[in-house]
Amino acid sequence: MTWWVFLFALGATARITRFGVSDVLFQPTRSWLARRQGEHQIGLATVFHCDWCLSVWVAAVVYGWAYLADGADWFAWPAAALTASYVYSLVAQTFDGEDD
């Protein structure tokens, strides 16, 4: 795996994890999972409320695809776009003081 594929996979993992845990667009799904799971049980809803918990699973999938892709465009372009989205959000938070 080349260094740029590794970095794109890292950025894609970060962006997908943020989407799953804190993005407004995924909130209805998180709420549905929480209602379905119940208040005092540990399950899928818990994973989608914890950066650490979700990132392990996302990284396993993303890095598996990165390994199989071996630098192919079908992985590199979407991973680069997700990485750019995540880097932009960091820049916006730093300079604008916004979270989303």
Image (cartoon, rainbow, N blue to C red):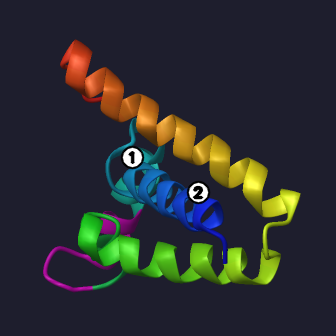
What's under tag 2, amino acid-wise?
A: Phe
At numbered mark 1, what does the secondary structure look like: helix, strand or loop? helix
- On the image, the x and y values in percent for residue 31 come to 34, 55
- On the image, the x and y values in percent for residue 78 come to 72, 50
In the image, is residue 34 above or below residue 11?
below
Question: Can you identify the residue that label 1 sits on?
Answer: 27
**For residue 2, what is the image quadrant?**
bottom right
Which dot, 2 or 1, sits closer to the camera?
A: 2
- On the image, the x and y values in percent for residue 49 come to 26, 63
Q: How many marks?
A: 2
Assess whether residue 11 is covered by the magenta stretch.
no
Q: Residue at x 49, y 73 (%)?
A: 58
Left/right placement of residue 88 relative to residue 46 reads: right
Crowdedness of circle 2 by 10 Å Cα count: few (<14), some, many (20+)? Answer: many
What are the residue bounds of the magenta stretch? 33-42
Left/right placement of residue 58 relative to residue 2 reads: left
Assess whether residue 35 is covered by the magenta stretch.
yes
At numbered mark 2, what does the secondary structure look like: helix, strand or loop? helix
Q: Is residue 58 visible?
A: yes
Crowdedness of circle 1 by 10 Å Cα count: few (<14), some, many (20+)? Answer: some
Q: Is residue 98 visible?
A: no
Q: Residue at x 52, y 83 (%)?
A: 60
What's under tag 1, amino acid-wise?
A: Gln
- On the image, the x and y values in percent for residue 59 come to 48, 75
Instruction: Kindly report the distance in space between the C-alpha atoms of the residues bearing marks 2 and 1.
Output: 25 Å
Closest to the observer: 24 or 69?
69
Question: Can you identify the residue that label 2 sits on?
Answer: 8
Closer to the chain start, of discs 2 and 1, is: 2
Closest to the observer: 46 or 61?
61
Closest to the observer: 82 or 46?
82
